[in-house]
Amino acid sequence: MAKGQSAQLDRKKLLADPIMMTTIVLLITFLTLFILYPLAILLVDSLYGSNGLSLDTFKRIFGLWTFRQAITNTLKVGFVVGILSTLIGLLFAYVEVYVRMRKAVGGLFKVVSMLPVVSPPFVLSLSMIMLFGRSGLITRFLLGIYDNNIYGYWGIVIVQTLTFFPVCYMMLKGLLKNIDPSMEEASRDMGASRWKVFTTVTFPLLLPGLGNAFLVTFIESIADFANPMLIGGNYDTLATTIYLQITGAMDKEGAAAMAVVLLCITLAMFAVQKYYLERKTAATLTGKASRARMLIEDKSVTVPLTILCSLAAVFVIMMYICVPIGALFPTWGYKFTPLTFKWFEQVFTRYNGLKAFRDSFVLSLIASPITALLSMIISYLVVKRKFKAKGFIEAVSILAMAVPGTVLGVGYIRGFANGLFHTGLLSGIYGTGLILIIVFVVRSLPTGTRSGISALRQIDKSIEESAYDMGANSLKVFTSVTLPLIKDSFLSGLVTAFVRSITAISAIILLVTPSYLLITVQINEFAEKGAFSIACAFATILIAITYGSVLLMNLIIKFFGTSRKVKEVE
Amino acid sequence: MKKFLAFLLVAILALGCMSFAAAEDRVEADPELVKAAQAEGELVVYGSCEEDYLAAACHTFEKLYGIKTAYQRLSTGQVPGKIEEENGNPSADVWFGGTNNPYDALAAKGFLDNSYVPANASHLLSDLYKDPNGYWYGIYTGILGFMVNKDELTRLNLEAPQTWDDLLKPEYKNLIWFSNYNTAGTPKLAANLMLQMKGHDEGIAYLVALDKNVQQYTKSGSGPSKNVGTGECVIGIGFLHDGITQILDNGYDNVGLVIPADGTACEIGPVAIFKGAKHMNAAKLFLEFALSPDCVELADDTGSYQFLVIDNAQQPEAAAQFGLTLDAVWDGYDFAKAVVETEQNVKDVIEALGDAATDGRFKTE
């Protein structure tokens, strides 16, 4: 009885809140139009063929050996990469938050873990080939191995792990920082060893976060297109198979059906995460950490952890140094001297480099604040409010991540080239910069939302409730209580959105028209054809731009973020 | 001061007239068409040839006629996917370069426009170099062959393969790179050639046997050629003019070119207008331009060394220098037959490779 009453009260409160209602309605429209609708079109395509409603297309694609092989390949890669990335991410996050490091190590560490984030994914495949391929710098010229085959399963796993672990690192770092140290200290005081504290206090608190990290990586991995494309060799994954089915075999119904299968896999993963892991969430955290954590200075802990991370760091750095250096060789793999700047020159003189950089930069710059704000609003609604469409909003915004970019791209072409349902309505946005911006937003939304949700879960409801009780409306509460509390998460969402957008490739490669020249499309073009030096030159400049932007935004976080206040107390 | 300004004005006018006259002089394009095209003022091109050549062609067109020309390089596989999706509302007007197979496929589905017959088509060397129904016109042709890394062959103590059958020798296992039957035009041509030359079943058997020696299939047709010089692959199957580019422009002297002694096939690089193009007159003018020496001779300058197929253009010297000649082309190759059969052939090959895969070859671990 009391339960029913409170639900009724909640509903009443919601209906009496016009700001909230408008936001929800607008949000649902956006999500339906730009995520659900393009996918629905694909579903319709795969079910509704020339001879009416049938499962023929599905029967046909399951008859293809390439497809069956691709499913197993994808799952294998996804699980291994998911687990490896989560573990490495946890290691880095733990060391940064808990362990006292030398300043230099800490700085190096940050650069290293940021690098994979700021560079387009296929850059790592590139340097992998350049360092460890048949004519790799290390394999051939250092070790004298002549036929090292990196194309295939292990190539993809290594490159994807290196690409995705920083995402886990950033997610877990945010979580660890929000754990109130007094809980761990209490158990230390009662005589538990550090390992015991980690396994019985920290780890259970982290478990939902680890689940998130694994899920995010798993989905990123199976939706990843650029790496399997470059380094996969004959080891095809679902994303590449779908792409090949569209661009090569010209079989869009088949591709749509394959996309549906892929979606089912990711949705299953999502269900496991949501209904199993989240039930275990410990809702014991109250507000932000009340004071700074006492860092571990114990040599037996710091030395091995630091060494382990430094080794990983050196490896990652080596991979990235290879990119700018590769851009200086006159004839890669054959003659390495004299070093030359001709590739950099060609970027601007022959390949419209300036326009490419400007277009990518401007579009991403517009998309990132929209993404950051949207994802914070979504996570706020999902975590803090109760209403009927809540499940829908959460599911749909996460769904966007589960869709491989290529498929989303085709869905957009199908759905918008001739207007909504081919009526001509909204067809104006097709082929413009607007649709690219929308794709950028949709593609980065899930990551932002996930991190926003993780951050918000750790803030107790009572803080906001007290603001409501004192008469603030929902806009006021969101802007003056919630947002400041998750400012770090918001700003890092901003950075992530920008970086993801400027380095995005899979969705936009099908949507970009000649009026916009995107830098990643150019890199992909050259890398795929083996013109490594020019691809490296492009990539070097891109990394410089993104890394510069990230540094700048980090500086902003440092001066305006919440952590400053914590530091002052310290 | 006034005098000076007047002089300047006259000078500019004169210069303008001269350049206009020069443009008129160089391309025999209908002035009416030029005017109509300039009224549209814009053109969007998808190119499937090398990026450099595409860029040069579009810039030259823009400079000659003052029509703003945007372009994007997309593989021959990507363009049809995109155009079909856009279903009559194409995001580009013209398709430039690549290989004729996908053009034929698009034409068959009604996405190319044959309403305009370019006057410059009269310069084509042979009717072979245009679509019988006028959906596309050829601008260049290249021949299929092998590119080898000479240093690597010496190190491995191997001879370069001389014929298609040589490629099946066990010593070449895992040394050969080819491109993907699904995504690239090159292997489709090779499949057609083999199936025509050896007969359907024999040809399939050959490709299945070849597959055992192939280390990797690249998505792009020019992928193997670009990886020979670097040593990523030892033997690459592809178009030989791509090999010349690697030697002459990129400095890979270690690349050797082999024309298969048992005959080979050639591709035709076409140009075509998309049905429903938004800048129709500019597109027509571009067709005239593409079939003129102004355009095709740019290929040589930008490292594309295909044979040209119009009679008033200068053939690139590089091809002859490396001993390439169109005589190497197997004269039994039937283009019309290939157009009809390509799709089925590719399907058969992939299925056959799948059967072969059950013995573990494709389980790449």
Image (cartoon, coloured by chain):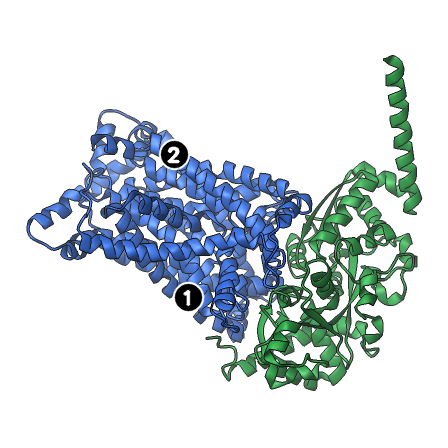
Chain colours: A blue, B green
User: For mark 2, what is the residue?
Assistant: A555
Query: In terms of depth relative to the viewer, which is nearer, A317 or A454?
Result: A317
Q: Residues within 10 Å of mark 1 (few under 14, many from 20)?
A: many
Q: Residue at left 82%, top 56%?
A: B114
Give the quadrant of the C terminus of chain A: top left
Q: Secondary structure at mark 2?
A: helix
Percent across and percent down for residue A166 are 38, 51
Percent across and percent down for residue A444 are 45, 46
Question: Does B103 appear above or below A297?
Answer: below
Residue that lies at the very extreme toward the front in this rendered image? A338
Dot 2 amino acid type: Leu
User: For mark 1, what is the residue?
Assistant: A77
* Occupied quadrant, residue B112: bottom right
Dot 1 amino acid type: Val
Query: In terms of depth relative to the viewer, which is nearer, B330 or A214?
Result: B330
Q: Secondary structure at mark 1?
A: helix
Q: Residues within 10 Å of mark 2 (few under 14, many from 20)?
A: few
* Occupied quadrant, residue B20: top right
Q: Is residue A413 visible?
A: no
Q: For mark 1, name the chain.
A: A
Asked if labels 1 and 2 share a chain, the reply is yes
Question: Does A2 appear above or below B1?
Answer: below
